[in-house]
Structures are given as structure tokens and as C-alpha cells.
Image: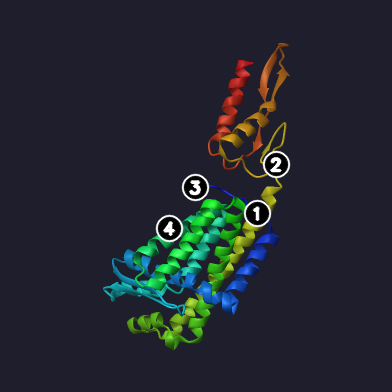
Amino acid sequence: MLSTIGRIDTPLPAAEAVVIGLLAFIVVNGRMLWKVTTHAETVLHESAHALTGIAAGRRIGSVNIDKNGGGSTVMVPASGFGFGVAAFVGYIGPSVAGLIAAELISAGRMVAVLWLGLLLFAFMVLLVSNFFGAIVVLTYGVLLYLIVRYTTAGVQVAVAYGVTWFLLLSGTKVAFAAASRPDGVTDAGILAGMTFLWRSAWCFLWLVGAIAALMIGAAILIRALAEGWNHAHEPRAAGVMMIWGPPPRGKADVAVCLELLRPAAVRQRTEAGKDKPHRATVAGRCPAFGGAAARVHERLAHDDQAD
């Protein structure tokens, strides 16, 4: 299970990714579905408070996840610049998490998105104080664990996309709700009391940040889809022969690539009239090999000398 952390996957085809995005949009905007999934957004919101508070040297007294979709994080001392920063990041926490997830997906690190989610829920289960909040965190954590542990790579990739779209869309939805009723937003009241900006100004900043995150995150995902589609149809290595398809992974695939590249060793007659080993230049690249490409050439050179 731990070996999957560094796995690199190919981005989904555009049609599939768009379908997942539309499903996430339905989940976020569907009244009944949002009543269930809003707690996941609340966990991200409160975890942003808690993580920033700890980084700012605050002690986290308690974290509550309420049945109505709200939540609260108590930290000590509840004053100073660090406390203000911790109060600010709550409403942009899910959007920032979505941006990070989108960037990981663009690098092919879909499984890393799920692992980060697991670590976050493990962290939050240590901080949550009320019974309902503990049930929420454990439920989402166990569900994510089952996906990482028992599902196929294809399912994991699809879930990573779904989680990313959900974070970006739900962050925008919650920020828009805060901007429409700033008088009832506790975080905005804290910041207004600490600065010269009024509540609605802080809510407006959150909304702008969430919309920007959604646009940037969507652009990253779309670019990842386009690049993934192009890379899936371009050769991975070129020379005497071409290798097509996704990059090889693991010792077994490396061995296959070695055998595929072996015919690239050809003989070329020299001026002296003797056969001399000659290796055709292998252009292109074999992604996900690390130093394997160098080892391929070393083995070819060794085999040529043996010939």
C-alpha cells in the first residue's frame, strides 16, 4: 500500500474528467447531497484554522464539527497576528487544498492527493472534540483508506479528480454564501475587530480568492488533460524502434523495456572490413525511469562488448 505513494498515473481523457467535474458540481449544488458532503468541506475549513494556528504557535483547545454544517476551532491565545492569519485562512483553505491537488494531478501524482487526504483526517481525528465531529472525520477517513487500500488504480485516479473538483467548487460555494451574509460570519467579525476593514470586505476577499482558485485549478486540470492526451499518443523512446504508450513502472516494466531496446544494437562494417558493434541513438525519453535510461545504455554497451 505504501508503495503506491510515489506512483505516477496518466491524466484521464477529457470526456471522463469533464463528467467527474459535472458530478462534483451536482454534489455541491444538490440540496440533499450537499447536506452530507458539506461536512467534508467543514473539516477542511477547520483544519486550515488548526494547521495555521499551530504554525503560528497557538495551542488548539478544541475543534467541533456541527450537524448543521458549521464548525469551530478554539485556539489559545486568541489574539495577535498569528490568530488573525488563522482566522483568515479558514474560508480559503478548501480552495487552496484544491489548487494543491490540481497541481499534483498535473504532475501525475493522483495517489498523493488521496494520501494527503488520509494524513489530514488522521490529524483531525486527534483534534476533534465532539462526538458528531469524530464520526464525520472517521467516516471520511475510513472511506478514503478503503479506496487507497482496495480499489484499482483507475478508481483511485477518478476519486482524486472528484476530490479536487469538490474542493474547488465547494470552496467557491461557501465563500459566496459568506459574502451574501457577512454579518453572520464569525471569522469576518474577528478580522474586522482586528483591522480597519469591515466584515463584508473580508468576505469579498474570500470570494475573490475562491473564484481565482477555481479558475486556476480548472485551467491546471484542463492543461493536464490536454498534455496527458498528447503524451499518451507520442513515442516514449525512438531510434531503430519506437515505444508507444504510458511510461514503464517497476522492475518488470524496466526489464521489458530493456528487452525491447536490445534490438537497437546493430552491426556496422568499418573501413577495416570488420564488424564493429554500433548502438543506434535512442532519442526521446522513458519517463518514470529515473536512472533507468542510463542503465539501459550501460547494459547495451556491456552486451555490445560481449559480442
Badge nearest the viewer, 4 or 3? 3
Residue 15 relative to residue 74: left or right: right
Q: Where is residue 304 drawn, in percent x and y?
A: 63, 20
Q: Select label 2 or label 4 by which is in front.
A: 4
Circle 3 or circle 2, nearest the eye: 3
The residue shown at (30%, 72%) is 75
What's the residue type where badge 1 is placed? Glu
Amino acid type at image mark 2 = Trp
Residue at mark 1: 227
Nearest to the eye among marks 1 and 4: give it: 4
Name the residue nearer the viewer: 8 or 213.
8
Q: Earlier in the sequence, mark 1 or mark 3?
A: 3
* Spatial separation of the CA atoms under disc 2 and disc 1: 15 Å
Single out the mark in the foreground, 1 or 3. Answer: 3
Mark 4 — residue?
119
The residue singled out by tag 3 in the image is 1
What amino acid type is highlighted by mark number 4? Leu
Residue 244 badge: 2
Gap in Å between the C-alphas at discs 4 and 3?
Answer: 14 Å
Q: CA distance from mark 1 to mark 4?
A: 29 Å
Camera-side residue of 98 and 16: 16
Q: Residue at x 59, y 42 (%)?
A: 287
Secondary structure beneath dot 4 equals helix
The reply to whether callout 1 and callout 3 are in contact (CB within 8 Å) is: no
Look at the image and tell me in which quarter the C terminus lies.
top right
Q: Sort mark 1 into few (<14), some (14-19) or many (20+) by Cα contacts within 10 Å.
A: some
For the residue marked with disc 3, what is the amino acid? Met
Mark 3 or mark 2: name the one nearer the start of the chain.
Answer: 3
Q: Which residue corresponds to the image point at 35% horizontal and 66% vertical from the top-left?
A: 127
